[in-house]
Each structure stands twice: as structure tokens, then as C-alpha cells.
Amino acid sequence: MEEIEVTSSSHSYKIIIGEKIRFRLKLFLPKEYSSIFIISDEMVAPLYIDEIRSNFTREKIFQTILPPGEQTKSIETFYSVHTAAINAGLDRNSLIIALGGGVVGDLAGFVAATYMRGIDYIQIPTTILAHDSSVGGKVAINHELGKNLIGSFYPPRAVIYDVETLQSLSAREIRSGYAELVKEALIADQNFFNTLINTDIQQVTAKELQSHLSLGIKIKADIVQEDERESGVRMYLNLGHTLGHALEAEMGYGKLTHGEAVAIGLLFTLHVSENMFSKQIAYKPLIEWLKENNYPLKLQRLDDNALLNKMKSDKKTVNSKIKMVLLDDIGSPLVKELSDQEILDSLHSFNRKLVTE
Amino acid sequence: MEEIEVTSSSHSYKIIIGEKIRFRLKLFLPKEYSSIFIISDEMVAPLYIDEIRSNFTREKIFQTILPPGEQTKSIETFYSVHTAAINAGLDRNSLIIALGGGVVGDLAGFVAATYMRGIDYIQIPTTILAHDSSVGGKVAINHELGKNLIGSFYPPRAVIYDVETLQSLSAREIRSGYAELVKEALIADQNFFNTLINTDIQQVTAKELQSHLSLGIKIKADIVQEDERESGVRMYLNLGHTLGHALEAEMGYGKLTHGEAVAIGLLFTLHVSENMFSKQIAYKPLIEWLKENNYPLKLQRLDDNALLNKMKSDKKTVNSKIKMVLLDDIGSPLVKELSDQEILDSLHSFNRKLVTE
Ligand SMILES: NC(=O)c1ccc[n+]([C@@H]2O[C@H](COP(=O)([O-])OP(=O)(O)OC[C@H]3O[C@@H](n4cnc5c(N)ncnc54)[C@H](O)[C@@H]3O)[C@@H](O)[C@H]2O)c1
Ligand SMILES: NC(=O)c1ccc[n+]([C@@H]2O[C@H](COP(=O)([O-])OP(=O)(O)OC[C@H]3O[C@@H](n4cnc5c(N)ncnc54)[C@H](O)[C@@H]3O)[C@@H](O)[C@H]2O)c1
Ligand SMILES: [Zn+2]
Ligand SMILES: [Zn+2]
């Protein structure tokens, strides 16, 4: 078992990573709660919700189970979960538990942030990708015009990451989660990046996985502690996300997983960076590894202008100039403002390069 | 012109009270903004929005004008204002201006709190009641099952209170606003209470009004600085609101103004308090003053059990026991947990007393 402490502007919380800790939740809660409200999805609940419930024998306990997938991060679901919470009689002394991947975590966190102006919640992430989403307090739902546009900064009271739950993940979700680990490695840690690109992610052992997650989480935790509200270095965590988010939006949420889109975004970032700084950084080893691990790279040809527009409606945009995170080396990110023409040219050359791979 | 400084957990902000300050807004903004987005309602906008716009000649400026009334604090309006903000291209460096009463302030504040996880906003209150709602950072929309159930704590960057705008208020809105001033006086200041009950609120001079507002705001500001998130003394500000909110909900929002409902709630509080502590506190002078000032007191007979249920769904309820703020004297509030039977008995005797007045 491993503990990582994160200090936020409102409180500190622990991230616990280990096996079987889902049976010992009470050890990690900061206080007693009058009632418990578990939010999960239809894939995760049948596997783990009873185990989570078994931690609470004395408390009133309620649950709401949502359809899986990005569509669940909608204003309608947000409102209906509020309705369920009110009907369950949740009060300011109640605890919300987010049991699932990033979708459940982001939605449940935003419900907790806004239920009676904010009640406590904890994250029990069950995907690899959620090592990223469960840490740092960003919670949100999607607007039909863009991802995560409605949300808050609202850190959890604890993140309890039982890696055993990751054993039931599909190959596709493993791929999705590893893309964010690669992102963290690229931002901050050359050795970690080397380790990752020598990993066959479908054959990874429990021990390796836990070590990768803990390295990734530490990188993320360090950054969000330094810059909770994303006025500076937290921007770096958007490496690969400018194009990633645009791809998700343009293809329709759910066609690509978040991580699959980010993987392509990371490759694009490296393409732009290598051109900008006229040197090799990591495009070649990354694309090899992505191919070995069956990441989808051949996309049906998307309209570059449409992608450009989606990139502009991203939250990082100021004055409708696109700010992209680039690398001038592994571990050395920087933010650059790019003109529309530069983006279009880069998309064009990137596409040509991908097609001929 | 008067300035009151409020310190919140995230930042400090100023409340400026004075005449014609709506023409000098830039003096009170903490920084330059890339664009301005004014949210107002159909009553207020024709009167003041051009004056507000005239402050911003260099910035991109947008506006959205909503129907007046409590119904505007809905999830649908919340979402559609987000849509308008996205379409206007607001970014993290934009400013939202809430121009109007408490309805516009609460809604616009909650949009600001959640747009791209939070951008700056200022309050330009235009009702007397909004002296209360614009200070302290409580922002919210209503759920169909209860008022203000979805919201956050998200303080503004400034409150710019131009008392000249209050000249266009209807008699009814003046009454509504004065109820919250009476509440503040009852919580903290016997002299202020004496002044108020010797005031004919439809004849008040600009100077008197400004003095009443500033006294009320100081009481509120002191309390919210001590307890921003309502874990202690901030509860006192709910004096009169347990029944007040239940009346609003039970009669249907908009039948009674918020302040009219609070006025009846204050009277009920005094009724319960005088019985509980077997002494006279202020029931008699308050009811006299309410009658002189034409507050609606003869309600169509409401069902006590229905009111009780609404009182229980209030945010202050913990473990479905009603916590009410009472007074053991003017300036001496306390919180008491009351049983359902005590509430029902009190409602019953209160109603009988009102009918025979
Ligand atoms: N808040 C943040 O900082 C942040 C960071 C990164 C991503 N995100 C968000 O996270 C979301 C993506 O998260 P995700 O990839 O975890 O998606 P997800 O929650 O949709 O989970 C992916 C799929 O795996 C299933 N699943 C989850 N746990 C499982 C388990 N243990 N066994 C079997 N199946 C399981 C889910 O039901 C779902 O079908 C996106 O909405 C993204 O915007 C947020
Ligand atoms: N956030 C808080 O701490 C807090 C505190 C108290 C009340 N509130 C909320 O405030 C709301 C009530 O506020 P309100 O009473 O200001 O209601 P309101 O905003 O509905 O305004 C009342 C009416 O007066 C009109 N109006 C506003 N300014 C005017 C002007 N200068 N001239 C002419 N007409 C004008 C409006 O169009 C509206 O029709 C409620 O929703 C209540 O929950 C919030
Ligand atoms: Zn991501
Ligand atoms: Zn009020």
C-alpha cells in the first residue's frame, strides 16, 4: 500500500494505492458521515458496488447507477442525480462516493461540488485513466458545444485506488489509461517514459501497473499542488489534449476513448514540437509503441478546419488564439501560442505522415 | 460613497455603496478583462444596461437578458446562459456582470462559478433585497424539489451598489428588501431595529436608505467573514427563513416575494422564541410595523403538515430534524432543534394568532 498526500487550497487529502483497500474504506475517511450515496455505472456496479456497500453497516446508504459512457456527463444526468440525492435525504453531513472511471468521477464530483453548495466526496477510481481524473479536483460535465465546459475545482476528501479492480478492464480501456501515463512521463520523467515504451500493456503485472500508476499520480499531484487553478504549470497536463479533445468532439464522444484521442494528440504534439525545434524528441519511439499496442491511428480523414474550430473552443483558448503545450525535450514542456495557419499546416503534414506510416 | 471590505477564503473584495457609481465601474475592477458578459433581466435591462455598457468602450461586450422572476433560477436557464457565454467566446479572462436583483445575482454567480470551472464576476445589485444576496458568495439555482439546492460558494470580485437604481423599485420590492434588513437588525443590532420600525419604507429618503443598507451589509459581511461556509454563525442569517422558504415553495415561487415570505417567517420566529423563553422580544412592534407597511399577513390557510415537510427539505436540516434560528433577545440569536410536534403546534398557534389580529 502506498500513500500520497495532496494539499489543495481548501484541505489536504490522501491518495491510497493498494490491493483490497476497497474493503477497508473507513480507515481512510476523515470523519463519520450521516449517510452515504454511491454513484456508479452499469458496468462497474455489478462488479464492485456490493463490496463497497459492505464497508457501511451502520450508515444509511443509497446508490444511483448510471449508463456507462461519456454521454453520462450531461446536464440531464447531473440534474437527475441531484434529484436522487434530494430524494435520498442527503444533507450537508453526507458523503458521496464516486465508484468508477473518469466519467463517474467527474460527474459525481460535480454533483458533490454543487449539492447544497458542496458536500464531501471520495473517489474510488476503477480505470487506469482515472488515476489522472481522480486527482486534482477538476470536476465537470460536458456542454453540447464542448467537453468539460461546466464544472468546478472541488477536491475529494480521499482517493482510494484499489488496483485489483483494474483486472476487469478491457484491452481498450487499458490502452486508454496508459495514454495519460505516457503523457505524464513526457511532461516530467525521461526514465518513466523509457520504462513505458518498453511495456506491453496487455501483459503488465499487477506490481508493474501499481508502480506506473504511482509514478503518474506523483507527477500529477506535484503539478496540481503547485497550481491548483491552472494559471501556470497545470496547463502542462493538457499535453496532447488540444487535438485530443477536438478529435473526441469532432468524431462524436465515445467513438474514440479519451485516452485513444489523447494518444493521437500526444503524437501530434511531438510532430509539432520536433518541427518547431528542429530536433527529434520522441515521435518515433512513441508511434512504434502505439502501433505495437494497437492504438487506433488511422482515422477516417477529418476536416482540418472543423478540428481547428473545435480546438479554439477549448478552455485554454484566450482571445481565440490557440495555446498548445509543446515539448522542447522530454521533461521540458512549454506553452506556445499558435496561429490558425500554423495549426492547419501542422494538421496537414501530420495527417500525411500518419497515412504513409 | 462608502466602502466595505470582505475577506473570503479565496480573495478579498470590496462592496461600494454610493450614487452614480454605475458610471465609474472600472475604478472598482481588480484587473483588465478580455471580454464582458452582462446578465440581466427584462425589467432591469431597459433601465440600466446601456449605462453599464457605457463603461466598456474598448472591450468586447455581450449581454443576455432573462425573464424576471424566481423561475429564471432554473437548470434550463442556467444551461442556456452557458450556451450564450460559449457562443460569445468568453474565456477564462472574461468578466461576468450580474445586473439586477437576487435572482440575476444568484444565477449569474453560479454561471460564473461553473463556466470553465470558474471565471470572475461582479455584482451590480439593483434591489434592496440584493444587499443581502450580493454579499457572501452564495450562488445557486433552484431544484424543483427545493430552493437554492444546486449551487456553490463563489464570492464576487466586487459589489457595486448604486443606490440611485433603487428609485425605480416598486412598493412591493421595497417591502421585500426591507424584510432582510429587519432580519439583520434582529440578529445583531437593537438600535438598528428601533430605527427600522420607526421608518415608513415608502417615504424613506435616499440618505436614510443608504444608511440602512450599509448597516445591514456590515452585519452580513461580519458574519460571512467569520463563517464563510455556514458551519456556525452564518446559520443565524437564516433567521425567518425556515418558514419563509417553506411558504415560498408551498405557495409556488413568485406568489409571495422572498422578503414577504421572510417577513412572515420572522414573525413566526418571534412567536416561537417568545413562547420558548416566556418573554416578550419583538413580536408586537414587528407585527405593527409590518401592518403599517402593508406586508401580506393574511394567507390563505396552508396545510401545516405540508409546510412541515417543506421545512424539512431545507438545506439546514441534518438527519431530518429541523434546526431553527431563534432569538432569546434582539441581537442574541441561537440555533434550536425542534421536534415535528413542536413545529406543528407552533404553526397552529401562530396561525390562530394571525387570524385574530
Ligand atoms: N477531471 C480530470 O482531471 C480528468 C482528467 C482526465 C480525464 N477526465 C475525464 O475522464 C473521462 C474518461 O474516464 P475513463 O476513461 O475512466 O472513462 P469511463 O468512466 O467511461 O470508463 C471507461 C469504461 O470502462 C468501464 N469500467 C470502468 N471501470 C471498470 C472496471 N474496473 N472493470 C470493467 N469496466 C470498467 C466503464 O463502465 C466505461 O464503460 C472523460 O470524461 C474525461 O474527460 C477527467
Ligand atoms: N445568495 C444569497 O445569499 C441570497 C440571499 C437572499 C436572497 N437570495 C435570493 O434572491 C432572490 C430574490 O432577490 P430579489 O428580491 O432581488 O428578486 P428579483 O431579482 O426577482 O427582483 C425582484 C423584481 O424587481 C425587478 N427589479 C430589479 N431591480 C429593479 C430596479 N432597479 N427597478 C425596477 N425593478 C427592478 C426584477 O426585474 C424583479 O421583477 C431569491 O431567489 C433569493 O433566493 C439570495
Ligand atoms: Zn485527459
Ligand atoms: Zn433571504
Image: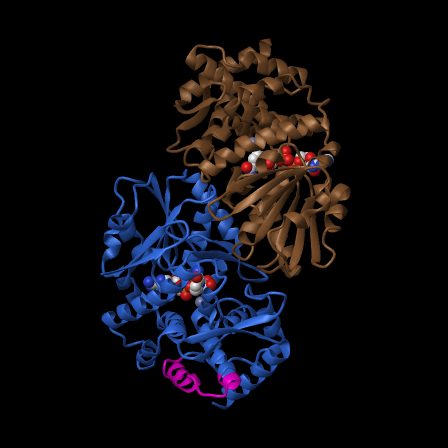
Chain colours: A blue, B brown
Q: Nearer the viewer, residue B25 or B69?
A: B25
Residue B252: percent from left, percent from top: 60, 31
Residue B346: percent from left, percent from top: 47, 16
Up/down of A166 relative to B284, above or below: below
Residue A272: percent from left, percent from top: 52, 81
Residue A145 can be seen, yes or no: yes
Residue B266 magenta: no
Q: Is residue B138 left or right of residue A224?
A: right
Q: Nearer the viewer, residue B76 or A341?
A: A341
Res A259 quadrant in image: bottom left
In the picture as drawn, the residue positioned furthest to the bottom comes out as A356
Q: What's the magenta region?
A: A274-294
Residue B189: percent from left, percent from top: 53, 23
Q: Is residue B183 left or right of residue B65?
A: left
Residue at the location (65% across, 20% down)?
B295
Up/down of A116 relative to A68, above or below: above
Up/down of B208 relative to A230, above or below: above
Residue at the location (59% across, 74% down)?
A307
Residue at the location (37% across, 39% down)?
A93
Q: Nearer the viewer, residue B20 or B143?
A: B20
Q: Is residue B35 left or right of residue A26?
A: right
Magenta span: chief secondary structure: helix
Residue at the location (59% across, 17% down)?
B194
Q: Nearer the viewer, residue A247 or A67?
A: A247
- The quadrant where ligand 4 appears is top right
Which quadrant would the N terminus of chain A be assigned to in this image? bottom left
